[in-house]
Image (spheres, rainbow, N blue to C red):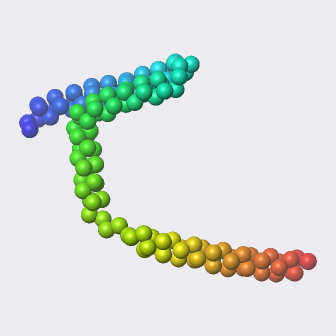
């Protein structure tokens, strides 16, 4: 891409982001203005405005980069080896046991130190 085309895209991106910001402001103000209306209608209107703002944001360079990042993250998540149910249960039980043991140790230490301080202070 040449420099003039990049500058033109950047200028239009700024306009697109301003329109997205305006849509968000309109959604917030409209939600407050129509607070007497049923919540279902307000939620539907907010969803419609959010979808329009999202689609417009995806038309920018940063929006396209964000969408590419989401696709790459999804590919990476598919590569993760997730633990089985048994492994998850065993790990959870180990964590609970360690937390209980540490709680008992700290409670005992606190009681001992409290007793020592009360003996010294009298």
| Among the 4 quarters of the image, the one containing residue 84 | bottom left
Location of residue 34 in the rendering, given as x and y in whole percent from the top left corner: 51, 18
Visible residue check, residue 25: no
Visible residue check, residue 72: yes
Residue 66, above or below 121:
above
Q: Viewer-proximal residue, 18 or 33?
A: 33
Residue 61, above or below 19:
below
Q: Is residue 111 left or right of residue 106?
A: right
| Among the 4 quarters of the image, the one containing residue 81 | bottom left
Residue at the farthest left position: 2
Residue at the farthest right position: 122
Q: Viewer-proximal residue, 43 or 114?
A: 43
Location of residue 59 in the rendering, given as x and y in whole percent from the top left corner: 23, 33
Q: Is residue 18 left or right of residue 109?
A: left
Q: Viewer-proximal residue, 10 or 44?
A: 44
Number of dots carrying numbers: 0
Q: Viewer-proximal residue, 40 or 76?
A: 40
Residue under the point 24% across and 53% down: 72
Residue under the point 28% across and 32% down: 55
| Among the 4 quarters of the image, the one containing residue 108 | bottom right
Q: Is residue 56 left or right of residue 29?
A: left
Q: Is residue 87 left or right of residue 54?
A: right
Q: Quadrant of the N terminus?
A: top left
Location of residue 6 in the rendering, given as x and y in whole percent from the top left corner: 14, 34
Residue under the point 24% across and 50% down: 71
Residue under the point 53% across and 22% down: 38
Q: Quadrant of the C terminus?
A: bottom right
């Amino acid at each position: 891409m040449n420099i003039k085309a990049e500058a033109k895209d950047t200028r239009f991106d700024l306009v697109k982001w301003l329109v997205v910001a305006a849509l968000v402001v309109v959604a917030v103000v409209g939600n407050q203005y129509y607070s007497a209306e049923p919540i279902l209608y307000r939620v539907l209107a907010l969803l419609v405005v959010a979808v329009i703002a999202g689609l417009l944001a995806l038309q920018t360079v940063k929006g396209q980069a964000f969408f590419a990042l989401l696709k790459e993250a999804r590919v990476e998540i598919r590569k993760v080896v997730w633990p089985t149910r048994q492994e998850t249960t065993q790990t959870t039980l180990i964590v609970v046991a360690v937390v209980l043991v540490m709680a008992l140790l700290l409670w005992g230490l606190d009681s001992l130190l409290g007793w020592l301080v009360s003996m010294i202070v009298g």
